[in-house]
């Protein structure tokens, strides 16, 4: 007798998994947040870590801090009590033995973690010297920064809200990676600013993974998130409310143009409904949220402070990182002295050592963040040299993978490093993501970004005869004259993204 059956057997299977340690998660978080938000992360650590302290208001040069640290390590504990120990100057050599035999308690160089991080110490001092770390830190500077800190309240951002839901969603690892890119491409309304194919091209991920992530993103709260445009957003909210087949949904899906012009009689005729039903459907649509992402905005009038400034200095481009709102920290010499005296229990010593190790890792993470942002900015300047010299029309196609290959990091690191950050250029302040865009190959062989194509379309329309505006097909022809071959539907999409009406609605009949 044959047929289906069940059996039990033992099998071995080797798999790989990535487990992020808490400190690594902290390092990634520090890399991702903007300079203005980094202070919240640092203040949380200051509140939970008694061995960390902020530098005093009096100006303390980096060289002096380093000397103080060396005194704390190599001289009497009494001298170290006044100066503390600058955590940017970690031990670079084996500690000298103290007369009371307790100096070994402070020797972090034996810890594997500090052995790995120790290489960053010299780079940290060089970095601080380059970005102004040796300049005086006056009472006026401290008062201005503290006033700014006290004026801000940190709330959960749209991106954080969505990624919290993504962590509990059932999706593949590539889709979760794609979710980071999709969430990062949302505008303040919660709409996608890039197509799935653009995201796949920039991130190097399979299109199927991006599409899987987008499908899951559209199920997240609030309803309407991840929409490509306003009709898609409104329709998603109706579907979420179980109204996907209602008159309102049909109106949005099939006759949105008539809806925006409130052509009630025409809508009633096309939908085979009476005027009162159409009016009720319009009222239902009016209760929907046209911008579900804005409810997470901390302050719609918040001023954007650039994280990086790029300016020309002679024949070279100079990159300056904004460190004005990043507190300068050090490890308190008081706690080093307490350990050195040998009056603490083993449990107390272990706790302080762990807290000092955590503080040291925080500083190294901040330095690593600054270095990574600076390197990425430098490569963006190199890749988009024509933009910085001549303006938006000269922006070239660029992907995160290209920058990641040059910098020597993974493209997800580039994505995190540029998230929520802005750069000041001679042509204005831009989101870092602005410089990453797919493009087209002109007939001359030169690469042209889609942002430059949008700029060309905008210029052509601004110069058109208002009594005979250019149709999308005519725009295609004019772009062809410039050596750029592009489909009419793509021109229509770019025109809509620019907020420009079709030619029949732009016509001036006067």
Image (cartoon, rainbow, N blue to C red):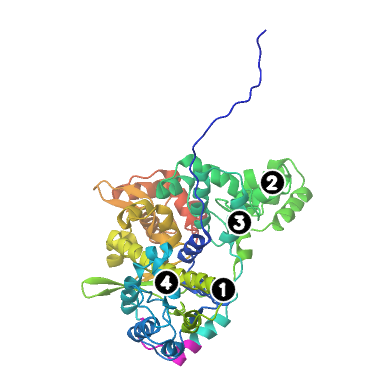
Q: Nearer the viewer, residue 469 or 220?
A: 220
Disc marking residue 164? 3
Residue designated by label 2:
239
Which residue lies at the image location 63% right of the left edge and 51% below the top edge? 220
- How far apart marks 3 and 4 lie (CA) works out to 26 Å
- Say which element carries label 4: loop
- Say which element carries label 3: helix
Pointers 4 and 2 in contact (C-beta within 8 Å): no
- Of mark 1 and mark 4, the one earlier in the sequence is 1
Q: Position of residue 89 (x, y in %)?
A: 37, 77
- Say which element carries label 1: helix
Neighbourhood count class around disc 2 (C-alpha, 10 Å): few under 14, some 14–19, many 20 upward: some
Task: Please provide the residue range marked out in magenta.
Answer: 133-143
Residue designated by label 1:
44
Pointers 2 and 1 in contact (C-beta within 8 Å): no
- Say which element carries label 2: helix
- Of mark 3 and mark 4, the one earlier in the sequence is 3
- How far apart marks 1 and 4 lie (CA) works out to 21 Å
Disc marking residue 307? 4
In the displayed structure, does residue 215 sit left or right of residue 376? right
Quadrant for residue 465, please give it: bottom left
- Of mark 3 and mark 2, the one earlier in the sequence is 3
Pointers 1 and 3 in contact (C-beta within 8 Å): no
Q: Nearer the viewer, mark 3 or mark 2?
A: 3
- Establish if 311 lies above or below 506: below
Q: Position of residue 276 (x, y in %)?
A: 78, 50
Q: Nearer the viewer, residue 234 or 423?
A: 423
């Amino acid at each position: 007798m044959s047929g289906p059956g069940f059996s039990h057997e033992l099998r071995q299977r080797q798999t790989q998994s990535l487990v992020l340690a808490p400190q690594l998660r902290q390092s990634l978080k520090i890399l991702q947040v903007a300079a203005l938000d980094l202070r919240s992360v640092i203040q949380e650590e200051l509140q939970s870590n008694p061995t960390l302290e902020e530098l005093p208001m009096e100006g303390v040069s980096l060289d002096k801090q380093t000397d103080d640290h060396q005194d704390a390590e190599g001289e009497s504990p009494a001298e170290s009590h006044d100066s503390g120990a600058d955590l940017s100057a970690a031990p670079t050599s084996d500690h000298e033995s103290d007369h009371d035999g307790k100096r070994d308690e402070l020797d972090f160089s034996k810890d594997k973690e500090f052995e790995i991080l120790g290489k960053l110490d010299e780079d940290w001092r060089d970095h601080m010297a380059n970005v102004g770390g040796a300049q005086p830190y006056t009472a006026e500077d401290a008062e201005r920064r503290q006033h700014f800190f006290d004026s801000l309240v940190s709330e959960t951002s749209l991106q954080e809200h969505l990624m919290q839901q993504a962590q509990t969603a059932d999706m593949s690892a590539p889709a979760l990676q794609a979710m980071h890119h999709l969430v990062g491409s949302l505008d303040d309304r919660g709409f996608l600013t890039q197509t799935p194919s653009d995201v796949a091209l920039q991130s190097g991920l399979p299109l199927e993974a991006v599409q899987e992530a987008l499908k899951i993103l559209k199920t997240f709260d609030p309803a309407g998130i991840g929409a490509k445009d306003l009709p898609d957003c409104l329709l998603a909210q109706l579907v979420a409310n179980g109204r996907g087949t209602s008159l309102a949904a049909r109106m949005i899906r099939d006759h949105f143009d008539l809806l925006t012009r409130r052509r009630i009689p025409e809508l009633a005729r096309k939908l085979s409904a009476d005027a009162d039903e159409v009016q009720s459907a319009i009222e239902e649509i009016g209760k929907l949220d046209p911008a579900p992402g804005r409810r997470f905005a901390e302050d719609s009038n918040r001023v954007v402070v650039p994280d990086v400034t790029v300016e020309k200095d002679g024949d070279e481009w100079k990159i300056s990182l904004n460190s004005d709102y990043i507190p300068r920290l050090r490890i308190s010499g008081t706690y080093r002295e307490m350990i050195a005296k040998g009056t603490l229990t083993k449990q107390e010593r272990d706790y302080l050592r762990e807290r000092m190790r955590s503080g040291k890792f925080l500083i190294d993470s901040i330095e690593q963040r600054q270095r990574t942002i600076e390197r990425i900015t430098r490569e963006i300047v190199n890749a988009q040299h024509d933009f910085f010299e001549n303006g938006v029309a000269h922006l070239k196609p660029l992907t995160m993978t290209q920058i990641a290959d040059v910098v020597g990091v993974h493209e997800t690191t580039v994505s995190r490093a540029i998230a929520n950050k802005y750069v000041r250029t001679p042509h204005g302040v831009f989101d870092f993501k602005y410089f990453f865009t797919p493009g087209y190959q002109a007939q001359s062989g030169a690469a042209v970004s889609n942002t430059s194509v949008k700029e060309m379309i905008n210029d052509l329309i601004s110069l058109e005869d208002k009594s005979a505006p250019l149709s999308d097909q005519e725009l295609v022809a004019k772009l062809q004259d410039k050596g750029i071959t592009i489909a009419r539907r793509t021109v229509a999409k770019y025109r809509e993204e620019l907020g420009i009406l079709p030619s029949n609605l732009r016509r001036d009949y006067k």
